Image: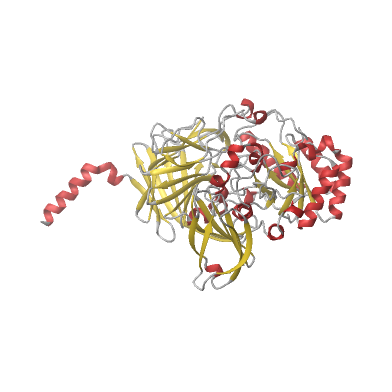
Amino acid sequence: MRKLGFYISILVCSVLGNSVFAQVAQAESPDGKLRLNVFSENGKALYNVVYEGKTMLDKSPLGLVTNESDFSDHLKFVDSKKDKFSKKYSNEKIKKSAIDYEANTLLVNFTNANQNSIGIEFRLSNNNLAFRYQIAPMKERLSAVVEKEVTGYRFPSQTTTFLSPMMKPMTGFARTAPSYESGYEADAALGKKAEYGYVFPGLFRVGNDGWILLSETGVDSHYVASHLDTTSEKNLYQVAFPNAAENNGFGSTGAAISLPSETPWRTITVGSSLKPIVETTIPFDVVAPLYEPSQKYEFGKSTWSWILWQDESMNEKDQKTFIDLASSLNYQFILIDALWDKNIGKARMKELIDYAKFKNVDVLLWYNSNGAANDAPMGPRNKMSSAIERKKEMKWLKEVGVKGLKVDFFGGDKQETMKLYEDILSDANDFGLAIIFHGATLPRGWEVMFPNYAGSEAVLASEMLYFSEGIRKQEAFFATLHPFIRNTVGSMEFGGTFLNKYLTKSNKDKNQRLTTDAFQLATAVLFQNPIQMFGVMPNNLTDAPKFQLDFMKIVPTLWDDTQFIDGYPGKYSVVARRHQNQWYVAGVNAEKTVKKLKLNLPMMAGQTVKLINDDAKGNSSEKEVKVNAKGDFNVDIQPNGGFVLRN
């Protein structure tokens, strides 16, 4: 019998030859739950991902193609090396202020048909896999252009998707797309086509086995920002480079690199529940600051008139009103938006800044990013797009006491545009200016990489609630998605939390808000950004209940911890955040019926806390409630409603 078993095992190895002996390397996360396998088969480099014994990604392609050498085919495994990586760091701008990152590393080296070398560096932390390519000099070449990646993600057949499509280039307002401002479809079929692909991040549900979040991080001027695209194989998604039409057709779709070079990180977060998805810090764990801060930057809350008072409010009188509002709310900032250069001018702007200083409010100013990439007409224009003009302008901004800029209308992911983002941030740091980007791409680790970076829009944000009834009808649906997708990988300057019943200056007649007041207050916690513009209006000082104003005065924008409590993307979401010793738990409901939840809140166990919630008619109120000694708490969330607990 032993001899028979021996011959059977030899037969199996012979029949399965390539499958048995194709695996060339393997690594696990520190807790052993996440496993990576790397393969070399028929000249291809492949990998798969297993979590708690369940396959989350089937064998998926690795590699890239340059103009000098092809690293996607005819690859030969050379060797592999394992190691460990750890670091402790702090960053007040992200979802957790202090992080202890530990990972097991794996470096796998291949050569191609031209005997050029490429390494693939993997880092596995608990629930997270990050990897990037290391490209060596190619014989006499010390420069190359990466033309495409074949990096892919092959999902099990039971997977559904939560994705947002890339916008068609040179469409939308003044041809400023793509700007990461499309909606989402929840639980869509695997392999559903989008003409221009899908933005990062992308969320996938692998049936009952768990969840996967895909994104990228560490993108700067040395590479392009990429996105996801479908392939001819329904289960396979691949990394795709920018569309040639972006930025009015200017700039390469590839990445010009100096050799040796490393690409940005591809990140994969895996969990049997959504908890690791919401709490992941992998976009920040694998990147490092690119320069030292020139000063300590301040972050916080801001008023802005434009969101409801629009262009007509760009005058001294209205801006003083919003400075007074910021002062009344103890907000750190006012954002003075587009057209200030024409309607107020620099001389009177200095007087306005002095008035704000007297009121203990700092000023942020809006700028158009444009030079030649699109047709956005609002000014100031042509001040951020060239180094000479930019530095002259920033010198003036520092002299008059401006603290930061909101730079708008980028519309592209080409390397040329990544360089513009980096140049604006770097120059701004020289002059002590914080930077927020609107009409922009997804931030990819920038909170750590750029000390003066203060957030990005890159979402279907509050302005579309003003302009579109269709978006107002979907406000709750999208709000239940953001904590699991867009906002979990980077800061999200949403610009909302409206206390007006109607999204107009007059607070009547049109643009009726379809979500409750408690929903709006909950989003101030659900949506995270170091500087958040809030939609509180001057009339709210008299027409909003005191408890709502009190909440908007104290709610932080900087958090020391973030925890997933409950939820399902597109249906409801409950998240807890801590600022210093105070916890906030916030939830919203996008379903058409009341959501009755039993929550476990150990951070509030045995405490008497304040609850803001809605009644059956959608009216919001605040009261004190008790969380039991086990941390259990029952709450009902009304349709299009929300709640907030705070201790």
Tally of marks: 0
Of 518 and 508, nearer the camera is 508
Residue 207, how many percent across, how many down? 38, 48
Closest to the observer, 11 or 564: 564
- Seen from the viewer's position, the closer of residues 376 and 597 is 597
Compared across the picture, whether 554 is left or right of 346 comes to left
Q: How is the image coloured?
A: secondary structure
Query: Does residue 605 appear in this view?
Result: yes
Which residue is pictured at 14% across the width and 49% down the height?
Answer: 7
Height in image: 632 above or below 473?
A: below
Q: Is residue 87 above or below residue 471?
A: below
- Look at the picture and state if 293 lies above or below 610: above
**What is the x, y in percent for residue 37?**
37, 49
Instruction: Choose top left, top right, bottom left or bottom right for residue 621.
Output: bottom right
**Residue occupying the point 79% across, 48% down:** 322
Q: Position of residue 236 (x, y in %)?
A: 40, 38
Q: Residue at x 28, y 46 (%)?
A: 20
Question: Which of the pair 8/55 is nearer the observer?
Answer: 55
Farthest residue, direction left: 1
Query: Residue 506 lies in what quarter of the image?
Result: top right
Q: Quadrant of the N terminus?
A: bottom left
Q: Is residue 180 visible?
A: no
How far across and how far down the image is residue 512, in percent? Answer: 65, 43
**Quadrant of the image containing the C terminus:** bottom right
In this picture, residue 364 sits left or right of residue 175:
right
